Amino acid sequence: MHSGFRYNQGGAAAHRAPEDYPRWLAVWLRALALLLRGRRPASRLVWAEDAAAETLLRGFPALLAAPAPLFGALPDLVPGLCRLAAAGRDEETLLASVRQLERRSGERFDWDAFFAACEKGNRRARRLDALSERLLSRRPASVELHSAHAALSSLAKNRKGSGS
């Protein structure tokens, strides 16, 4: 019975982190939606080298962005795959990349969709900032442990500062 289950016998590291599965699944669902619309996903596929490129590709709703960290073997499977890297590039280079993608795909860049994706990312960032500030405000004060005197002194300071 044990020989029937051969999953991860070599003890290899996980292919992707568990928190990446929703993004991975979303890409596959978008590919399925393209198939259902009668379009070939492989012809609409763009390799997003970084998170900035993935955000930029939100301006092309008809194109399918494949994030590099999630689909490591994809460039080997799809010959002639279009690649986009946006992190650390200047505005002129990014605009030239957008225009090149427009020519190559025949699709127009949708600035409204791009701004909507950016706003969604900004809302998420604000929620995470608020959460991190709230967690930091609840962080217990640390106690100096160099000596007994330092520990008692820092404990007394922490007690005064907390208002208790």
Image (spheres, helix red, strand yellow):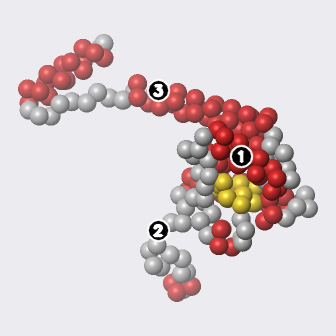
- Secondary structure under tag 1 reads helix
CA–CA distance in space, label 2 to label 3: 34 Å
Identity of the residue drawn at 57% across and 85% down: 4
The foreground one among 112 and 134 is 112
Dot 2 lies on which element? loop
Give whichever of discs 1 and 3 has the lower sequence position. Answer: 1
Q: Find the distance from the CA under tag 1 to the CA under tag 2.
A: 39 Å
Residue 58 drawn above or below residue 119: below
Q: Are marks 1 and 3 in contact (CB under 8 Å)?
A: no
Tell me if 143 is positioned left or right of 31 in this view. left
- The span from disc 1 to disc 3 (Cα, nearest Å) is 42 Å
Looking at the image, the residue that sits furthest to the right is: 38
Q: Which residue is identified by label 1?
A: 96
Question: Which one is nearer the viewer's eye here, 2 or 16?
Answer: 16
The quadrant where residue 124 appears? top right
**What residue is disc 2 on?**
13
Residue 134 disc label: 3
Q: Residue at x 30, y 12 (%)?
A: 163
- Mark 1: which amino acid? Ala
Give the mark, 1 or 2, whose residue is nearer the N terminus.
Answer: 2
| Image position of 140 (left or right of 126) | left
Amino acid type shown at disc 3: Arg
Nearer-N-terminus badge (2/3)? 2
Give the percent coordinates (x, y) of residue 5: 55, 81
Quadrant of the image containing the C terminus: top left
The quarter of the image holding the N terminus is bottom right
Image-based side of 152 in relation to 61, left or right: left
Residue drawn 52% across and 87% down? 3
Are the residues tagged 2 and 3 within 8 Å (C-beta)? Answer: no
Q: In front of the other: label 1 or label 2?
A: 1
Q: Nearer the viewer, residue 137 or 111?
A: 111
